[in-house]
């Protein structure tokens, strides 16, 4: 089943089967869980004049390869802003929650442009490409990651963080217009920023993930995007980081802040 087919299933029914090949270890890849909830939110609001402002995701528990239930509740619908909560259920328990705010454009005299400058990476074809021969969780087969700052996971590095290009794998996905749910699926695929400091393989997983949507998507699914992550603090088994996503024209598309649980 393609992502497009999954989104169509979400539009038609409350219980959905997500496609095989998207697990990250024993649980569903968090980006796909977020994508499913985002698609449910977009369908519930059904107002193209309102664009995503911010989304906050909490990954409550593991999601197995089985049917899930998606429920949506509009918490408030004002003249400009709509706030919605979407829950992903499995085994009669909430496993993930998305709280999102959508807003229509409003007149304002306030204009600030202090966005960070996009990194000047070499072309993706010149960089180390993942997945290659590396042994990675199965969800990585759906993407291509071209590492510009080759600070690789579990390499006992003395520093965190990295960056590079990334996109949906062109051999796994047909090209089409890029959707908001696709952004959630793509943005989460890079590992936590502290993973290069791991001396050996050990788990690390997202606990909370907050995404601020800056510029509207006007892209195709196979387009390349740029990524850079920065770790603020890591101690006592948790890390806090933020990340940027730019398109190939160096427009800032989204900003993420994440709390990660670290088992090393």
Image (cartoon, rainbow, N blue to C red):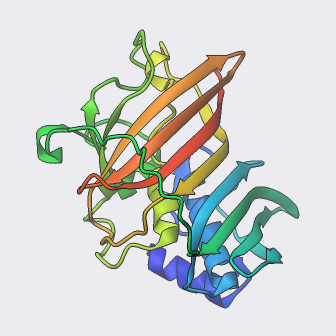
Residue 179 x/y as whole percent? 45, 74
Residue closest to the far left:
126
The quarter of the displayed image where residue 102 is located: bottom right
Say if residue 239 shows up in the picture: yes
Residue located 82% across and 75% down the image: 76
Q: Nearer the viewer, residue 247 or 222?
A: 247
Identify the residue at horizontal 55%, vertical 60% (top origin): 32
Q: Quadrant of the C terminus?
A: top right
Q: Is residue 110 above or below residue 72?
A: above
The answer to whether residue 28 of the structure is visible from this angle is: no
In the foreground, 179 or 21: 179
Instruction: Using residue 107 as the reference point, say whether residue 127 is left or right of it.
Output: left
Q: What is the x, y in percent for residue 137?
A: 47, 43
**In x, y percent, where is residue 144?**
30, 51
Q: How far across and down, in percent of the image, does residue 97 sit?
A: 75, 58
Q: Quadrant of residue 150?
A: top left
The image quarter containing residue 207 is: top right
Q: Residue furthest bottom?
A: 12
């Amino acid at each position: 089943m393609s992502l497009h087919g999954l989104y169509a299933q979400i539009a038609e029914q409350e219980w959905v089967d997500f496609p095989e090949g998207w697990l990250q270890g024993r649980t569903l890849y968090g980006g796909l869980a977020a994508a499913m909830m985002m698609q449910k939110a977009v369908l519930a609001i059904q107002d193209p004049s309102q664009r995503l402002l911010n989304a906050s995701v909490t990954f409550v528990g593991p999601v197995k390869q089985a049917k899930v239930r998606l429920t949506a509740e509009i918490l408030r619908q004002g003249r400009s802003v709509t706030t919605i909560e979407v829950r992903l259920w499995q085994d009669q328990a909430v496993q993930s929650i998305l709280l999102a705010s959508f807003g229509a454009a409003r007149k304002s005299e306030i204009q600030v442009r202090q966005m960070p400058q996009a990194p000047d990476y070499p072309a993706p074809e010149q960089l180390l490409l993942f997945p290659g021969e590396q042994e990675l969780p199965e969800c990585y087969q759906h993407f291509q990651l071209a590492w510009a700052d080759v600070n690789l996971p579990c390499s006992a590095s003395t520093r965190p963080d990295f960056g590079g290009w990334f996109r949906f794998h062109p051999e796994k996905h047909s090209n089409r217009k890029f959707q908001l749910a696709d952004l959630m699926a793509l943005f989460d695929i890079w590992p936590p920023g502290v993973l290069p400091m791991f001396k050996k393989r050990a788990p690390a997983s997202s606990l909370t993930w907050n995404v601020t949507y800056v510029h509207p998507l006007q892209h195709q699914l196979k387009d390349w995007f740029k990524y850079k992550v920065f770790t603020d603090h890591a101690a006592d088994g948790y890390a806090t980081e933020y990340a940027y996503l730019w398109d190939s024209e160096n427009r800032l598309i989204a900003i993420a802040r994440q709390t990660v649980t670290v088992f090393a």
